Image (spheres, coloured by chain):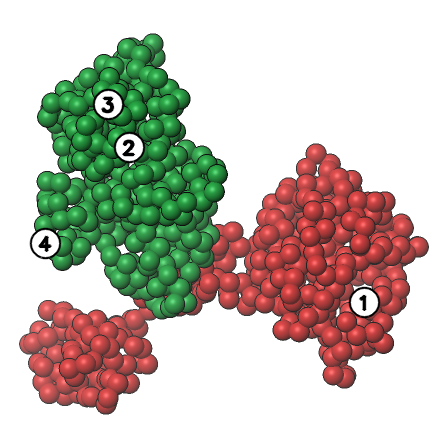
Chain colours: A green, B red
Amino acid sequence: MAETDITYREALRQALYDAMREDDSIVVLGEEVGRYGGAYGVTKDLIATFGAERLIDTPISEPAIIGAAVGAAMTGLRPVAELMYVDFLGLAMDQLANQAAKIRYMFGGQIGVPMVLRTQGGTGRSAGAQHSQSLEGWVMHIPGLRLAMPATVADAYHLLRHSLTLPDPVVFIEHKALYARKERTDLAARVLPWGRAAVRRAGNDVSIVTYSLMVHTALDAATLLHEAGIAAEVIDLRTLNPFDMKTVRASVERTGRAIVLSEAPLTAGVAAELAARISEECFDYLEDPVIRIAGEDIPVPVSPALEAAAIPQAALIVQTVRRMLRR
Amino acid sequence: MSVLLTLPRLGETMESGRVVGWLKRPGETFRRGETLVEIESDKTVVELPALADGRLLEVIATEGSEVEVGAPLCRYEAGDDAASTPVIPAEPATPAAGARQRATPAARRLARARGIDLAAVQGSGRRGRIEASDLRMAETEALAVRRWPLSTQPRCHALLLHGFGGDAQTWAPLASLLARQGIAVTAPDLPAHGATALEAADIAGLAAPLAALLDGTKGELIGHSIGGAVAVALARAHPERIARLTLIAPAGLDAAIDADFIQGIATVRNPGGLAHLLRRLSVRPLALSAAQLARMAEAFAAGRLHALATTLVADGRQQIDIVADLAALPMAVRVVWGLEDRIIPWTQVARLPSPVAVHLIANAGHMLHWDAPQQVAALFPGSTRI
């Protein structure tokens, strides 16, 4: 298949379409996923092909959506539950953390929960403090949940397809600012396997470890740093569970310097976990402390200017790297 | 009461100042208004006066040092008690013995691996922190290097890397011949050997500090035995700086080796045992005085070669393999071997990649640059330029 211009949104839709064609047990359920086509249009028109039996519009009740998906997964279906905003995760946390994540363990491995919880998070659309959070840290903290956070169009397609083959629950967090992102991509081309981080740009001076939207911010920063004669390596983790420490370690051991970049608030987040892992495993190779660059510890503002100021921008990364390297 | 005097901001844009000179010594008393120290900012030199009577206890920022605004200059005793307490001579501001040196983890790892004392290294990083790059400079400085004098302009350069248990001096017969042919010869004592204060446990460790010895112009690289494997590692890392590689009885081609010799050199305790081992090296017996032998035995007994011996030879077999690296080298490579070699058999040339030229020399042992220096030197004829 040839390369075509395709958006992140279209790639996700294509992944659902292809997977549902191949696997009759896949059903999609959530608020407005059927006739309306999803709040961000990812399931648009799928109901025309697969019918209301497999594209199920639910009441506005997150516990019901996730709870029904857990039950369906335990009894033979492979549900894709859509949570309109990751910010609503709190409502579904018992179903997710206490049930989906624990059932294989509680029942001695006799039964699993092969479901995918699709949701989206992050800033970029002035959606306000209750609709712009980055809550991946909540999910990463729970053993038993897989966690994917695609940054590219190809990964949106392939990570979702792979999620729909796994025997355990996957939380799949899309980024609301990436839906319209268009890339020239051949969806049939092979990508890195599930669980492997991608080196999006190679460099020898500093490793920037990140995921989701921040991959693109890091790449912008790397371009600016290149003009200053600094070669930054940008690593896209792609999945946070499993988490590819091997690729990170190889990079940091070579560069001797690591920056961990996350859109989520700085304190006690994914960035803290990554920084700790790097400090522990690469200690003997470090030339500087591992630095976290992350969102401000505040509710995300609505004002576009303030919203942008609340999350890391390329200029901040450039400034931090230059201070680190003193050049 | 002891007080810290810190550097005030002496101008609106001043971020730091340089201590030009102290006008008071530790123990001296001073009156309010007397100048204590002269500070140079980027604009001017300023005399810094005492703001109260007191006595200087300790100079923290020594003359010539650069001090940031707000950083301490000295400690002094202020007020009346300055006059009444006895004078205690203060120590100069050097770090206390055993104080932990500021160094990055990467630098500490390198220092451990190479046996470098961090206290002897000057840090170039933030707040004087030692970084890995500072260690690399220290490594080069810690190498003991011998150079043979030339009477004419050098035709080319040659770097000579000795074998296990050897040192730069073992090259003397060949090096003087090469020098006569207009070749500028440089030979280091490899890490864990001779007068070089660095340690190494593997080929990478042996090769690590050598890059700085490669001359700016492309030259000859010659390695003997283990030094041959080191030369290959160096040539792999810096192919653009080496015109031709010559390996003399190199290690790392095949499994066979006189393992007893390697273990023996690494563990020998007395001159008699050493003399017995050295007889295996060459066809012509070595003329070493009893004093020389005793000195060598004493050096080997220090155990510096233990780790290296274990890496190189285990279960009676060589543990390193240079064949793949050899095949990947872009420059001309040749191998010279003595047909009477008792340490590594010359038949291992069979494993060489086909572009590698082979020269076999009769009546020569493992140290063929002792047994047949003229024949080895003849491989570097003065007439050809490379």
The residue lying furthest to the bottom in this view is: B44
Taking depth in this image into account, of B65 and B1 the one nearest to the observer is B65
Residue A171 shows which numbered tag?
A: none
Q: How busy is the neighbourhood of tag 2: few (under 14 within 10 Å), some, or many (20 plus)?
A: many
Q: Amino acid at mark 2?
A: Phe
Compared to residue A116, the image places residue B75 above or below, namely below
The residue lying furthest to the front in this view is: A48
Do the residues under discs 2 and 4 have CB atoms within 8 angstroms? no
Q: Tell me which chain the residue with mark 1 is part of.
A: B
Residue receiving disc 3: A55
Asked if residue B27 can be seen in this view, the reply is no
Q: Amino acid at mark 1?
A: Leu
Residue receiving disc 2: A172
Q: How busy is the neighbourhood of tag 4: few (under 14 within 10 Å), some, or many (20 plus)?
A: few
- The secondary structure type at the circle numbered 3 is strand
Compared to residue A192, the image places residue A101 above or below, namely above
Residue receiving disc 4: A303
3D distance between C-alphas at marks 1 and 2? 69 Å
Q: Amino acid at mark 4?
A: Ser
